Amino acid sequence: MGTILVSGILILIAGLGVRSIIRDKRSGKSSCGGSCAHCKGCAASFASEEKK
């Protein structure tokens, strides 16, 4: 019974996290700071590293 309860709580927390991400995405919020020069996932960053 304890396993089911803990699993249910974890699923609820994950669902709330996904819901929050979707709401932020729809409202235009982003986790991006806007500074592509310092971003490890930015194409411009990869291009500058290749030149070195």
Image (cartoon, rainbow, N blue to C red):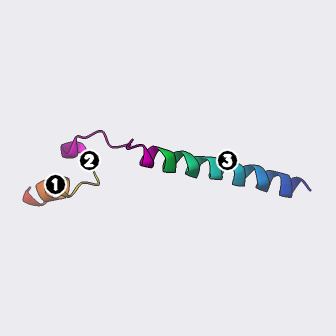
Question: Is label 2 in a helix, a strand or a loop?
Answer: loop
| First of labels 2, 3 by sequence position | 3
Prevalent SS, magenta region? loop
Q: Which amino acid type is marked by label 1?
A: Ala
Specify the farthest residue to the right: 1
- Residue 47 painted magenta: no
Which residue lies at the image location 18% right of the left edge and 44% below the top edge? 37
Left or right for 19, reference 2: left
Left or right for 50, reference 9: left
Disc 1 packing (10 Å; few <14; some 14–19; many ≥20): few
- Tags 2 and 1 touching, CB below 8 Å: yes
The region drawn magenta spans 24-38
Left or right for 45, reference 24: left
| Disc ID at residue 44 | 1
Left or right for 48, reference 42: left
Q: Give the spatial CA distance, label 2 vs label 1.
A: 9 Å
Q: How far across and down, in percent of the image, does residue 19 sit?
A: 57, 49
Q: Which amino acid type is marked by label 3?
A: Ile
| Disc ID at residue 39 | 2
| First of labels 3, 1 by sequence position | 3
Question: In the image shown, does 41 or 9 lie closer to the viewer?
Answer: 9
List the residue tagged with mark 3: 13
